[in-house]
Image: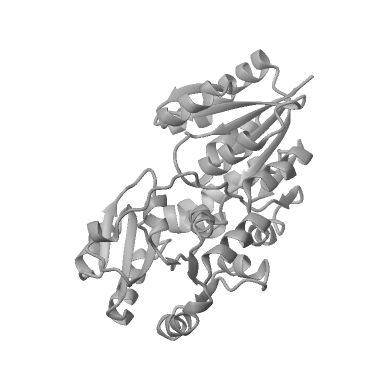
């Protein structure tokens, strides 16, 4: 008899934790496990929902609009789903899903994935006092789960100071099946230029304004930066940019842009284990990243392949010059092999299967 696993998430969309959930679901041994995707709130990517249903995967869309209402009463709806579908394992992803899952009865096993360093991320997102409160509430819920799985070793090292029921499985990413390349010409980037690319939220936590300022001041004439995404810092970033910094906007599929780029760049102040970096490695891009622990963890996985450079806040120019000097050592094929060996979603899914 197959074991039924319910994946509980706010909504399913392109990017971030959703990609991790989809990577697990698609790579499960479906002869042993039956996945059920439960989305709590409105805003699903209907293309993804349709694709899952066409593959015979159950998707339950709760279509809730109120975060507070779900925090107070959402466990009743999830309890009904668990009972009706005979769910044996709940795998939750995020603040609200973890809290709702923590209120389930003991017959069902409960695990989660911790996708961020909440001590940093919640303060950046909500401010000092509200961030502290959200962290306390989230920790209390996670202590009621059977197991908490961090998305990186770095996050586990932080969380194990407050949680006993904690381990880690690094995020993984699948192969990219698109053959499309976005033309550099459409962005006004000449052939032969070195293209840096960032994909994600434009926010103080991701330090996107600082990144644009640094690139603006230290770039060379043949270097361009493509900034994909949106967020509260988007307008300020556009105000300080020059014609070597391009803003294509929010894209459901960033891969054609990544495939025409050379280097993935991020000056983020906090990450769990960035899915965007995994996608960049899948495209064979070199890395130029801030020296936060989760970024350094990518470099520490193996020294066999030169991936690029990481920099501190006052070393941007110096490390950029090191990257230029070592640019010929960035080999797309070797970087793709590194990613397949260590950070493939099928390997991630196998590790979760062992936990189920």
Coloring applied to the structure: one colour
What is the quadrant of residue 299 in the picture? bottom right
Q: Say left or right for 237 vs 179.
A: left
Examine the rendered structure and indicate whether residue 233 appears above or below residue 28: below
Examine the rendered structure and indicate whether residue 208 appears above or below residue 42: below
* Residue plotted at (66% across, 70% down): 300
Examine the rendered structure and indicate whether residue 324 appears above or below residue 210: below
* Residue plotted at (26% across, 66% down): 189
In the image, residue 155 lies at what x, y percent? 63, 58
Examine the rendered structure and indicate whether residue 16 appears above or below residue 290: above
In the image, residue 356 lies at what x, y percent? 76, 35
* Residue plotted at (52% across, 76% down): 309
| The N terminus, quarter of image | top right
Q: Looking at the image, which residue sits at the far top? A: 84
* Residue plotted at (55% across, 27% down): 38
In the image, residue 11 lies at what x, y percent? 47, 33
Foreground pick, 119 / 109: 109
Foreground pick, 137 / 15: 15
Foreground pick, 102 / 219: 219
Q: Say left or right for 88 vs 41.
A: right
Q: Say left or right for 313 vs 137.
A: left
Residue 127 in sight here: no
Q: How many marks?
A: 0
Residue 4 in sight here: yes
In the image, residue 146 lies at what x, y percent? 75, 39
What is the quadrant of residue 296 in the picture? bottom right
């Amino acid at each position: 008899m197959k074991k039924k696993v319910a994946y509980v998430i706010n909504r399913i969309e392109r990017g971030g934790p959703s990609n991790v959930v989809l990577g697990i679901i698609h790579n499960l041994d479906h002869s042993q496990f039956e996945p059920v995707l439960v989305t709590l709130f409105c805003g699903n990517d209907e293309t993804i929902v349709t694709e899952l249903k066409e593959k015979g995967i159950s998707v339950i869309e709760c279509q809730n609009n109120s975060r507070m209402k779900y925090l107070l009463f959402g466990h009743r709806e999830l309890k009904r789903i668990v009972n009706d579908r005979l769910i044996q394992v709940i795998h939750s992803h995020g603040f609200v899903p973890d809290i709702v899952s923590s209120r389930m009865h003991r017959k069902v096993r409960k695990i989660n994935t911790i996708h961020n360093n909440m001590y940093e991320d919640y303060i950046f997102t909500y401010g000092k006092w509200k961030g502290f409160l959200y962290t306390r509430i989230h920790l209390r819920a996670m202590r009621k789960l059977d197991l908490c799985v961090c998305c990186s070793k770095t996050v586990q090292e932080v969380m194990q100071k407050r949680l006993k029921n904690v381990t880690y499985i690094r995020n993984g990413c699948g192969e990219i099946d698109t053959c499309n390349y976005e033309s550099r010409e459409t962005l006004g980037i000449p052939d032969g230029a070195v293209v840096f690319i960032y994909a994600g939220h434009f926010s103080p936590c991701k330090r996107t304004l600082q990144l644009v300022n640094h690139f603006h001041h230290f770039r060379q004439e043949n270097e361009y930066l493509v900034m994909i995404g949106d967020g509260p810092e988007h307008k300020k970033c556009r105000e300080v940019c020059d014609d070597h910094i391009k803003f294509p906007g929010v894209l459901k599929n960033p891969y054609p842009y990544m495939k025409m780029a050379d280097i993935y760049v991020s000056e983020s102040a906090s990450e769990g284990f960035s899915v965007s970096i995994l996608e960049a490695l899948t495209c064979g891009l070199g890395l130029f990243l801030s020296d936060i622990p989760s970024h350094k963890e990518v470099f520490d996985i193996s020294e066999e392949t030169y991936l690029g450079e990481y920099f501190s806040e006052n070393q941007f120019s110096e490390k950029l010059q090191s990257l230029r000097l070592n640019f010929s050592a960035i080999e797309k094929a070797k970087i793709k092999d590194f990613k397949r060996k260590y950070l493939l979603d099928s390997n991630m899914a196998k590790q979760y299967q062992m936990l189920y």
